[in-house]
Image (spheres, grey):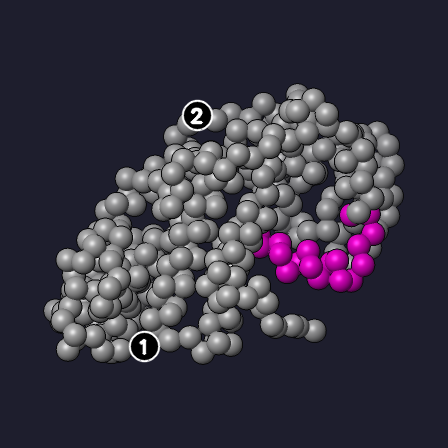
Amino acid sequence: ARAISVVHTAMFDAWAAYDTRALGTRLRGSLRRPAAERTLANKNKAISFAAYKALVDLFPARKSDFAEQMTYLGYAVDESDTSTPAKVGNTAAQAVIDYRHADGSNQLNGYADTTGYKPVNTGDTVVDPWRWQPIRVPLEGGPEQRATTPQWSKVKGFALKTPFQFAVPGPDRLLNSFDPKHIDNLLALTSNLNDRQKVTAEYWADGPKSEFPPGHWALITQVLSRKRGHSLDTDAKLFFALGNALMDASIAAWAAKYRWDFVRPITGIRSRYKGKQVTSWLGPYQGYGQVPGERWIPYQDPRVVTPPFPEYVSGHSTFSSAAAAILAMFTGSDSFGASVT
């Protein structure tokens, strides 16, 4: 989410230099170019250089891939291009990069945790069945998960004033009214998925080596752009709004996750049904069958298992709601208008 925000903010700030009214987020209107220079070619070049610089900073190991794309577009990346659009793009991106290097994410240290968070449970022992458990991946004998970015509530938002700006009710357990039957209902819902439910689970899995939920919504927005025939100007604004909404959503969601430190379904089901027989998915091409409760697994790629962070609130739901709200407000419609068989 943060990467999408950084790249599209850099692109927006470069694009804003060629717009009559738009102001960049960091340098405001100081990069504004005269009307005679506000051509599509100059905009394309400026945002391409901005994107390239931001992407190389975020994903340095992929620099050759980004350079290849720039070459494909006809742009030099060896600093031999001293044209005004290239300078605008590089300057806009550098200002965003400098700001984001000190935004609390700890990017320069590999996004390592800065809070000292330690889960109460381990991969082998559940001390508190209502708190997050770092499980083993693969489940049987693999290394224990490490909590992902507990420090994310410290990241500077875009429109978000504080990480707890929107009051999120605590999980029922913390409100002293949690009904364990919620776990029974969850087990029943997942005990024999039909084909439609399986396809839905696969489509929204967004696990390792995917674009993750924020990137998934960026892909959906790309489809929407193609369907509606968006111009460069429209998409510069749309993806800027989308990226920053996704980043703010990530901050709010992760603040709640590590505040409540709530159990994920796999731990809840395995703890509640330990020593009892339950219906579980058995793995690829094996269907469903009876297993001891402590060996229950969800319908999911066995190499993925469950994400390495607390359950509540749902990241998928938070990202999706934020992205859907942006798209609905931007297009004036809540209808996507696409289907797949």
Q: Is residue 202 magenta?
A: yes
Kind of element beneath mark 1: helix
Q: Is residue 72 left or right of residue 302?
A: left
| Residue 126 picture quarter | top right
Q: Dot 2 corresponds to which residue?
A: 116
Q: Is residue 261 above or below residue 325?
A: above
Q: Magenta segment, which residues?
A: 190-207
Q: Is residue 212 above or below residue 315?
A: below
Residue 212, percent across and down?
52, 54
Visible residue check, residue 184: yes
Q: Is residue 9 above or below residue 122?
A: below
Please tell me how many numbered marks the rendered image carries.
Answer: 2
Residue 14, percent across and down?
24, 63
Q: Residue at x 83, y 44 (%)?
A: 188
Q: Dot 1 corresponds to which residue?
A: 72
Residue 151, percent across and down?
42, 34
The amino acid beneath tag 1 is: Tyr
Bin the neighbour count of mark 1 within 10 Å (Cα to Cα): few under 14, some 14-19, many 20 and up.
few
Residue 45 is marked as none
Q: Residue at x 63, y 43 (%)?
A: 306
Bin the neighbour count of mark 2 within 10 Å (Cα to Cα): few under 14, some 14-19, many 20 and up.
few
State the CA–CA distance, disc 2 to disc 1.
45 Å
Q: Is residue 262 left or right of residue 232?
A: right
